[in-house]
Amino acid sequence: MQCPKCDSAMEAVDFGTEISVARCTGCGGLFCEKQTLLQLRTEWLADTVLDTGSAAGGAKTNDIRDIPCPRCSNIMDHVQDSEQSHITLDVCPTCEGVFLDAGELTDMKSVTLMDHVRRLLSRLGG
Ligand SMILES: [Zn+2]
Ligand SMILES: [Zn+2]
């Protein structure tokens, strides 16, 4: 599989026994199933293990749009994350594959953690 953003090779990386994603050896972008992403959001340390690319590089590749899906070659949609609107993901309308730029999974998870803390605090406060 080849990275649609920088043309480098993507390698399979496993997390645990059930989760496998493709990671770009160049820009550090991640490609996985929509379903897998939902799992990753709840997995402790998934970002640390998988999202090893540089966030600064990811900010640059995030601007590359209308990329072909690395799996089925259809043009991917650039969509805002439903929970965190500052994060934009490339989602394939055909095979539901998702491309995350380097740093996006980490971003997603850190904000998720902060949301939890905020919710906890508001519960304590009110
Ligand atoms: Zn790449
Ligand atoms: Zn696809």
Image (cartoon, rainbow, N blue to C red):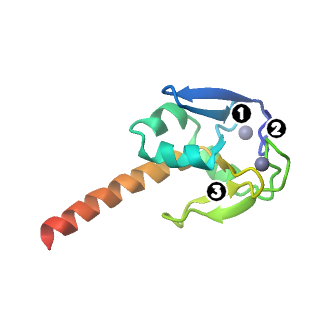
- Measured in 3D between alpha carbons, the distance from the residue under mark 2 to the one under mark 3, in whole angstroms, is 18 Å
Name the amino acid, label 1.
Gly
Q: Which residue is drawn at the image coordinates 35% and 52% (left, top)?
A: 113
Given this view, does label 1 or label 3 mark the residue nearer the observer? 3
Q: Answer yes or no: is residue 81 visible.
A: yes
- Measured in 3D between alpha carbons, the distance from the residue under mark 1 to the one under mark 3, in whole angstroms, is 18 Å
Name the amino acid, label 2.
Asp
Residue 118: x %, y % from top left: 27, 63
Residue receiving disc 2: 7
- The secondary structure type at the circle numbered 3 is strand
- Measured in 3D between alpha carbons, the distance from the residue under mark 2 to the one under mark 1, in whole angstroms, is 8 Å
Q: Nearer the viewer, residue 55 or 1?
A: 1
Q: Label 2 neighbourhood size at 10 Å, few (<14), some (14-19), many (20+)?
A: some
Of the 4 image quadrants, the one containing the N terminus is top right
Of the 4 image quadrants, the one containing the C terminus is bottom left
Name the amino acid, label 3.
Leu
Return the disc, 1 or 3, that comes first in the chain's sequence. Answer: 1
Q: Nearer the viewer, residue 72 or 22?
A: 72
Vertical comparison of 106 with 48: above or below: below
Q: Label 1 neighbourhood size at 10 Å, few (<14), some (14-19), many (20+)?
A: some
Q: Is mark 3 within 8 Å of ligand 2?
A: no
Q: Quadrant of residue 57?
A: top right
Return the disc, 2 or 1, that comes first in the chain's sequence. Answer: 2
Vertical comparison of 54 with 125: above or below: above
Residue 26: give its label: 1
Look at the numbered discs 2 and 1 and tell me whether their residues touch, using CB distance below 8 Å: yes
